[in-house]
Image (cartoon, rainbow, N blue to C red):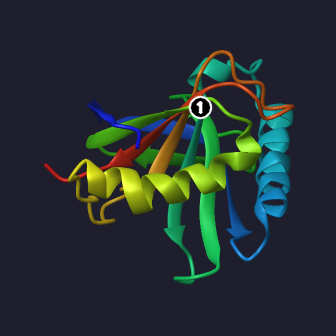
Amino acid sequence: MQSPRLEHFGPLRLVGLMRQHNTAQDNNGVFRSLHSQWNEYITRRAEPPSFKTNFGVFGCMADGATQFDYFCGAPSDAPLPQGFVALQLPLMRCAVFAYQEPISGMRDFVRKVFSQDLPAARLSLLPSKGGTPEFVERYWDDFDHSIGVGGLDLLVPVQG
């Protein structure tokens, strides 16, 4: 079990791309789909990428079971580039879990955090409301999106 640290996160305005993805795919299929979204974001953003300030935001299960919303972007107060959206994250208390394995294993890591680590830490999820995401990925400066390797923090909004 990985014990989380707790931190307050947000409020934060992010600018980037929002897409829907299918959970019925295997890990490699989900990885390829998200990787494609990140590549599009990095290619289209106006300024050079600064990986230490990039975020992935897992939104709601769009249909309750097989589709999920995913946002990738960075903090910005600039006007929106064409095709980009702004995502406003509220102030949240988050359990933070570090992840340093290849990104292709992230799905299994998230599953373990939600099924084992949060209950073991006696933490309860914050109900999704008012723009609260399911979880946020905060990429470290060593993360290389082109190959999916480096570190990130998984921030899970919790009650309390």
Residue to which mark 1 is pinned: 74
Rate crowding at label 1 as few (under 14), some (14 to 19) or many (20 or more) other CA atoms within 10 Å. many
Residue 100 in percent (x, y) is at 62, 29
As drawn, 44 above or below 118? above
The kind of residue on which mark 1 rests is: Ala
Q: Residue at x 83, y 57 (%)?
A: 28
Q: Is residue 137 visible?
A: yes
Say what secondary structure mark 1 lies in. strand
Give the side of residue 94 with respect to residue 18, left or right. left
Residue 38 in percent (x, y) is at 77, 42
60 or 110, which lies in front? 110
As drawn, 104 above or below 42? below
Q: Residue at x 50, y 29 (%)?
A: 77
Quarter containing the N terminus: top left
Q: Residue at x 27, y 65 (%)?
A: 127
Residue 75 in percent (x, y) is at 53, 29
Q: Residue at x 84, y 43 (%)?
A: 40
